[in-house]
Every structure is written in C-alpha cells, then in structure tokens.
Amino acid sequence: MFIAGAWSEAKSGAEFGVLNPATGEEITTVPDGGQEAAKRAIDAAHAAFQSWKHTTAYQRAEILRRAYDLMIERKEHLARTMTEEQGKPIKAARTEVQYGADYLLWFAEEAKRNYGETIPSARADQRFIVLHQPVGVVAAITPWNYPVSMITRKVGPALAAGCTVVLKPAEATPLCAIETFKILIDAGVPDGVINLVTALDPKPIGEEFCTNPKVRKLTFTGSTAVGRMLAGKAAANMKRVSCELGGHAPFMVFKDADPVHAAKGAQAVKFLNTGQACISPNRMYVHKSAEDAFLSTLSSRVSKLKAGSGFEEGVAIGPLVNPAAVDKVARQVEDAAAKGAEIVTGGKRLTEGDLGRGYFYAPTVLHGVDPSMDIYREETFGPVAPVITFEDEEEALALANDTEYGLAAYVYTRDITRAMRMFEGLEFGIIGINDINPTSAAAPFGGWKNSGLGREGAREGLGEYLETKMGGFSI
Ligand code: ADP
C-alpha cells in the first residue's frame, strides 16, 4: 500500500495472494489493509489537500504530463504485469496501457481549462462570479477488467482539479495499481496526494469511504449492485458520487447494413477482453434478411479464436477472471440452451491441456435467444454472443431500450436517416454508429439508467471533481 508518501504494510501484517487466471498460480502477495488503513490514507489525503489545492493548474498539469511520458516509457512492463494478473492478451494489454496514459495527457491539458463565469445581474450594483474549486478528498474504487485505465480515468481528473485521492483497486489486480502508482510518484505527485489501499475484503474500506466525513466524493466503477449500495450510503452523507456500472449493450444490424462487415465488427468488439467489458454487446439484434450472412460470418470467425495464456502468440481469448465468472457464463448458456437457443459454436468450458489450470470458456455464439432467457437481461461479462432476429425497426428499438441498463449501444446501417433515428432514440450514454470503438479520453464515457451517474473523460470528466462557488459582489 502507499500511504502518506510511504510504501506501507497492513498494521496486522496480513497479506493476500494475487493469482494468474491463466494458470491459477500465485504471482505474489500484497498487503491486506482493512478499515484502519483506509482511515490512515484518508487522513493523509486530507492533510495533503490543504497544500495541493493551492498548487497552480500549470504545476499539476506538468506532473500529469510527466506521468503520461513515464507510462508510455514503461508500457511493456505494465502490459506484462496486466497480462499476468488479469489475463488479457499482451497486445490488448498494450492497447489498454496506451488508453490509460491518454487520460493522463488529456487531463494534463484540461487542468488548465477549469474556467469560471461572470453572470450579468439585474441590479446595477451587483456582479455575479462563478468559480470551480476542487471538491476535496476523493475515494476511488476500481475494477479488475481494465486495471490501469480505470485508475487513470479517475486519478487523472482528480489531480487535475486539485483533489487528493485514496484508491482501492480490485482485489484481483492490485499489481497494476501498484505499478501505476509508481509512475505517478516518479512523476512528482507530492506525499499524501495519492494513497493506495489494497484489500482482499472490500467491504470495510467501502464503509469507511462512504462514512468518513473527510471524504467529499466517491467515484466507483464496478457492478450495478455494489454501485447502488455504495451510492446509497454515500448519498446519506451527502457525498458527491459518480458511478460507472454494468451494461447490456444492444448491437443492431439493419437490413441495409453490410452483414459481413457488421459480423466482423461484432466479433471484434464482443470478444475483446473475453467479453469482460461494460460496453460489450450483450444482445445482437439482426434483421431477418441479414441473419444468414451475419451468423455464418460471426460463427466461422468465432470458432477460429484461440484461447490460452495472453503471453502466447495468436491468442485472442484470455481466461475469465475467476472460477465464479466461468460458472456464471456456463449457467447463462445452459439456461438459454434449455429454453430453446441454438449453440452455433462454443458453449463449453475449456479444460484440455494447459487450459485446465486456468479459467477458460469457449467463445460462443447463441442463436434464437428470446426474452425468457437469463442472458437476455443479465450482463454476461464473458465470451458469449447472443443473436436475436427482428423484422421491424420500431420493434427493434423498443427491444433495445427494454433494459434497466443504458451504457453502450451499437448500430449498423447505411441509411443516414435511420442512423439518426437510432442515435436519437436509443436510451444509452454511448452510441457506436457503424463504429465498434466509440471511446476516447476526449469523449464523455458513462451510462443512463442503472448504468451509472456522471461522466468520465472529456470536458465533463474534470467537472466531476469540482464544486461550484458563486459569489455575489455588491459594488
Ligand atoms: P465485479 O463483479 O466486476 O467484480 P464489483 O462491483 O464486485 O464488480 O467490483 C468492483 C470493485 O468494487 C472492486 O474494487 C471491488 O473490490 C469493489 N467492491 C465490491 N464489493 C464492495 C463493497 N461491498 N464495498 C466496497 N467496494 C466493493
């Protein structure tokens, strides 16, 4: 852990193991901090805020810019750490490190654009001035699926705004958090401004984050169930909250789209990170006339995806994060098959040879999925593409919106008017129109409905770490 400018053990000396999900082997151990460590870290962040808030945007920008350079320099090392503890193929890990670094650069630039406002008053002797100041100590909780970029997406804007931070990374991926912290420290972030608490049991840390009066803002990325619980607790103490939660993205292929091109896109985005992404398509609505070409292209490509250790050449499907994740995917596929879905390819655990040591599930395509099946409503977070046929645009839009989630949606069409109707009609925060990668540090990321609160990245991302102050001046 890193608290008040020093690497630190748990007071109790407790540690927990970090596992390689491709082999089940322990890589190393890290401190198992409890509520006491969280409290210490919050105290350190609170003390450091008193001076950090007085630094200029230019000073903070310089540190973030240096952190960006260092992250690029150490890209290979970070990527290898990620593949080892999280499992994604090394190429994907490099891409993520770049994506993570992009947030540092973006917020190094945005730090200087924290503009205020003057507002005309109806009174001749009055002036209104609005300024935005850092909210204070930020408590951040991050997930394991994107273990570097989910940290920089929070710590970048928090530091840019002038906030101090206590981070609790996911228990599955503390090593990526440690390496990211080393970069920030080497870039010159002062003592106490960033603090890292690693823990096997997140509950006492979450409790402290939501109730400690020194914490002014909670930022969380993870499941909707945990986000809802934490947001509720934090709200009871009037803390600012932003949450990036689960998704259930529709992927819509209309009759005027090229079904082969759409299927290639579907394969690429669905199986990224073995389906463990909140913007991963979870329901593929394909027009009846495009169904055959889409399904045959998708299934033939999916059946060729190679599973294995992310360090192996040509591997596209890494392990799932843990055995429970494999069980969840297997349960959803069994449920769908029992209710009449056809398993076009995959549909089983992978246990042959070395795969048996890790947590692997075959990349799978299901056809004939319907609303009676669990997979139709539940987030999968695994390598399964469920295909559903439709005939009418209005009906497809209604089906796509019929979910508690509202994070990402994808549309394939070559009809510009239909593209606009879908863009306007879909109740989601991120829409890819013939585009499977609608994310960037420059673009607002976040969801509607039960997919979250607030936005990360972009101009909005800085605002999440600022309070508004209005001054009325009588002259
Ligand atoms: P996932 O299902 O993707 O693992 P979680 O929401 O369980 O999603 O985990 C995301 C992050 O939330 C992790 O850092 C995890 O440790 C943390 N977390 C899980 N449960 C709690 C909790 N009760 N209090 C605080 N943090 C939690």
Image (tube, helix red, strand yellow):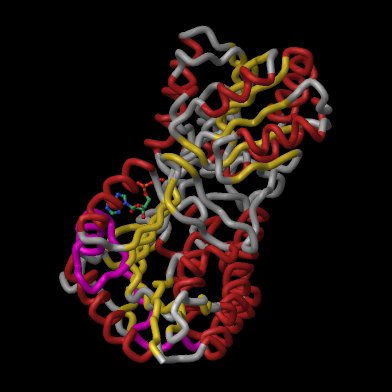
Q: Is residue 157 left or right of residue 233?
A: right
What residue is rendered at 38% in x and 60% in y?
219
Assign the C terminus to one quadrant of the image: bottom left
Determine whether 445 is above or below 296 in the image.
below
Q: Position of residue 248 (x, y in %)?
A: 51, 34
Task: Classify residue 8 by image quadrant.
Answer: bottom left
- Indicate the position of residue 71 as horizontal and vertical percent values: 60, 74
Q: Is residue 307 left or right of residue 132?
A: right
Instruction: State yes or no: residue 206 in magenta.
Output: yes
Q: Is residue 358 visible?
A: no
Which image quadrant for residue 50?
A: bottom left
- Occupied quadrant, residue 292: top right
- In the image shown, does 20 or 346 lie closer to the viewer? 346
Q: Is residue 305 above or below residue 391?
A: below
Please, is residue 109 above or below residue 82 in the view? Answer: below
Q: Nearer the viewer, residue 93 or 100?
A: 100
Q: Nearer the viewer, residue 359 or 464?
A: 464
Residue 181 pos. (x, y %)? 45, 75
Is residue 52 found left or right of 81 in the rendered image?
left
The stretch drawn in magenta includes residue 49 = no
In the picture, the quarter occupied by the N terminus is: bottom left
Task: Name the residue at 39% across, 54% down.
Answer: 172
> Magenta residues, as a range?
188-216
Which residue is at 52% across, 64% downward?
A: 461
Q: Is residue 405 above or below residue 340?
A: below
Instruction: Give coordinates of residue 377: x percent, y percent.
Output: 45, 25
Residue at 53% x, 42% y is: 407
Q: Tell how many labels.
A: 0
Q: Is residue 152 visible?
A: yes
